[in-house]
Amino acid sequence: MAFRAHILGAAAGGGLPQWNCGCGNCRRAREGSIPAQTQSSLAVTGNGRDWAILNASPDIRAQLAATPVLHPTGQRELPLTSVLVTNGDIDHVAGLLTLREMQPFTLFATDGIHQVLTDNPIFDALNASVVVRETIALNTPFALAPDLTATLFAVPGKVPLYLEGETVETDLMGEQTVGVDLQSGTARAVYIPGCAHLPADLASRLDGADIVFFDGTLWRDDEMQITGVGTKTGKRMGHMSMSGSDGSIAAFAPLNIGQKVFVHMNNTNPVLDPSSPEYAKATASGWIVGQDGLEITP
Ligand code: MLT
Ligand code: MN
Ligand code: ZN
């Protein structure tokens, strides 16, 4: 069997609904009139048997419980080979603490992201004799799981919020924020849950891919302000928005991509409401709006 991706969580940090948020989407999700979504994570396989998890969200316990292909197959056997984190953000690493029950897997990240984890001794809960941390250099292919090769590459982003200093560069290129190129047989998928903007060389990397999972945090840059939940812009958070002339929908329009899938949606994003005009616009532009449990094959 060939490449498959399973969206474990389609929402950005906070999830939908977010515990302290009373915005329209969060209220509708609590009422059950739009689907709730858990936090950012994608499971991938190259053979239908051995899986890797890209980003370990704080919701990983419930996500695994809801995903039969990742259930134990024996007393302590799990079809999980590895976990890879694409940045040090809380929504992508806090779930590692849930994975601490002496379960062997390989933890892949760049040196820069591993450094963030080693600087936080709470992650020593992952016993080093069981969970092997492997450092991956940028632009160097490695075996993420059987029949699945991955390559990490830098995308514009920033350091995690909890490591921000007085001045913050929001479109830093380096080891702090990466995308993942996935190759299995002839299938190629790319996963980029956070991206500040789309430089030309990144656009050409995406051109021709069978599937791209891309940062869908906000619909518009001032969305937190207009929904009344905060003052930060998308740009300040290191995320490009979906709409507008400098948005992802416009930037991807000239590219030849089999399936374009938005992931990592903030709970304020109107596309999370399937009856919204923004949802209609995104899908009419050829995008799939990611949902928890959605499985994508090339
Ligand atoms: C982000 O994607 O911008 C971060 O996950 C925000 C956060 O740390 O809550
Ligand atoms: Mn995030
Ligand atoms: Zn909300």
Image: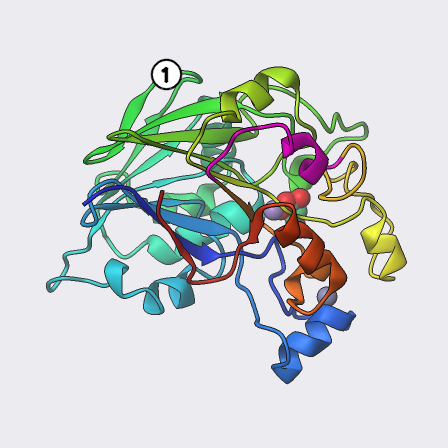
100 vs 173, left or right, is left
User: How many residues crowd mark 1 within 10 Å: few (<14), some (14–19), many (20+)?
Assistant: few
Q: Is residue 102 above or below residue 108?
A: below
Q: Point out the stretch of residues depicted in magenta.
A: 247-258
The answer to whether residue 288 of the structure is visible from this angle is yes
Write down the quadrant of residue 186 in the picture. Answer: top left
Q: Position of residue 10 (x, y in %)?
A: 53, 56
212 vs 6, left or right, is right
**Residue, x 71% and y 69% (percent of image)?**
25
Residue picked out by circle 1: 140
Q: Position of residue 15 (x, y in %)?
A: 60, 62
Most extreme residue toward the bottom is: 31
The answer to whether residue 269 of the structure is visible from this angle is no
78 vs 136, left or right, is left
**Residue, x 58% and y 25% (percent of image)?**
155
The quarter of the image holding the C terminus is top left
Most extreme residue toward the left is: 74
Write down the quadrant of residue 111 in the picture. Answer: top left
**Residue, x 55% and y 50% (percent of image)?**
91
Q: What colouring style does the render use?
A: rainbow
Q: Is residue 107 above or below residue 201?
A: below
Q: Nearer the viewer, residue 87 or 198?
A: 198
Amino acid on which the number 1 mark rests in the picture:
Thr
Q: Is residue 159 magenta?
A: no
**Residue, x 20% and y 34% (percent of image)?**
147
